[in-house]
Image (cartoon, rainbow, N blue to C red):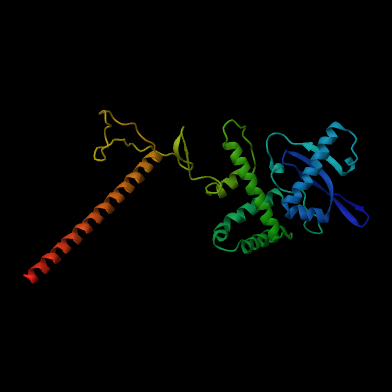
């Protein structure tokens, strides 16, 4: 990492990675570096700014800002760890200006999140992130704040979701990411990541974790007492589990309405019987 002194500000060369796969080595102040590490929107502004300069440079070889761009490179279609949302690929966190999010530290972050996963679900997230940042700082002998850990993991999570959605979409080319398997093991079964069931005309009801759900065999007739044949005497068409569930709920509702009506009529009969007995009793007393 190189540093340049301009006026009273120290500029550090860092590598920005745009969502398109382009990477740029640029000169940033310590303020810009720290803010980009903790503020995703600011990071996006930076990458968009240099990406526009890069596109202009494709058409105009001489650019007034080319001195700020020390290197521009286009990554291959295969996604590597450099194209994941590391925000700044080179991140000074201490006076030693060492990289914070190395491959080893990212794997350690994922592993620590896995260890403390239950605490995130039941406790205060900030407290849990402080535990994780403390463990990371001690293992790397570097000051890594809890906000850096939180922001980094959010970026990993968002990128994992995008990769998963892309690879699950029919017709897309497969994209590789070195941390995908670890994130899949950690988050793959979360409802917010993957719906537990999907339903489509082509596949019917499907458990995404276990595969297709066995279709329940049922038939449709007008007579609830005979579910084996239709009106023409032929076996009725099997219904999907979704249709069967809907039919069962409707039948249960109809039975409930019928039961309440029957109970109401029984109460009325008892009332009439009591009223008749009262009238007879009064007549007998008068006689």
Q: Residue furthest left?
A: 287
Residue 24: which quarter of the image?
Answer: top right
Seen in the image, is 3 located left or right of residue 223?
Answer: right
Q: Which quadrant of the figure contains the C terminus?
A: bottom left
Q: Name the spot of residue 208 as percent of width and height, x first.
A: 49, 41
Q: Name the spot of residue 99 as percent of width and height, x first.
A: 76, 52
Q: Residue furthest bottom?
A: 285
Q: Name the spot of residue 214 as percent of width and height, x first.
A: 39, 38
Q: Nearer the viewer, residue 18 or 110?
A: 18
Q: Nearer the viewer, residue 278 or 230?
A: 278
Residue 155 visible here: yes
Q: Residue at x 88, y 55 (%)?
A: 10
Q: Residue furthest right?
A: 7
In the rendered image, the vertical position of residue 161 relative to residue 230, given as above or below = below
Q: Name the spot of residue 63 as percent of width and height, x first.
A: 89, 37
Residue 219: which quarter of the image?
Answer: top left
Seen in the image, is 163 located left or right of residue 47?
Answer: left
Q: Residue at x 68, y 50 (%)?
A: 104
Residue 88 visible here: no
- Report the label total: 0
In the rendered image, the vertical position of residue 143 relative to residue 56, given as above or below = below
Q: Residue at x 61, y 56 (%)?
A: 112
Residue 20: which quarter of the image?
Answer: top right
Q: Residue at x 68, y 35 (%)?
A: 78
């Amino acid at each position: 990492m190189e540093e340049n002194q301009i006026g009273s500000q120290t500029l550090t060369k860092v590598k920005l990675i745009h969502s398109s796969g382009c990477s740029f080595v640029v000169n940033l102040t310590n303020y810009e570096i720290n803010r980009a590490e903790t503020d995703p929107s600011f990071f996006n502004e930076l990458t968009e700014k240099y990406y526009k300069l890069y596109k202009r440079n494709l058409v105009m070889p001489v650019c007034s800002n080319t001195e700020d761009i020390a290197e521009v490179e286009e990554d291959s279609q295969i996604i590597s760890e450099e194209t994941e949302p590391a925000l700044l690929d080179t991140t000074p966190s201490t006076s030693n200006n060492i990289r914070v999010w190395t491959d080893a530290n990212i794997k350690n972050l994922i592993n620590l999140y896995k260890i403390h996963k239950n605490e995130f679900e039941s406790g205060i997230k900030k407290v849990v992130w402080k535990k994780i940042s403390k463990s990371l700082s001690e293992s790397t002998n570097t000051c890594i704040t809890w906000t850096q850990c939180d922001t980094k993991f959010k970026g990993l999570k968002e990128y994992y979701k995008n990769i998963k959605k892309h690879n699950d979409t029919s017709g897309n080319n497969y994209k590789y990411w070195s941390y995908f398997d670890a994130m899949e093991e950690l988050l793959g079964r979360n409802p917010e990541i993957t719906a537990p069931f999907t339903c489509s005309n082509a596949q019917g009801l499907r458990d995404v974790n276990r595969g297709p759900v066995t279709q329940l065999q049922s038939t449709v007739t007008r007579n609830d007492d005979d579910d084996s044949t239709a009106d023409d005497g032929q076996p009725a068409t099997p219904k999907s589990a979704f249709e069967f569930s809907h039919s069962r709920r409707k039948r249960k509702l109809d039975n409930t309405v019928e039961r309440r009506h029957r109970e109401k009529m029984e109460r009325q009969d008892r009332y009439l019987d009591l009223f008749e007995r009262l009238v007879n009793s009064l007549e007998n007393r008068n006689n």
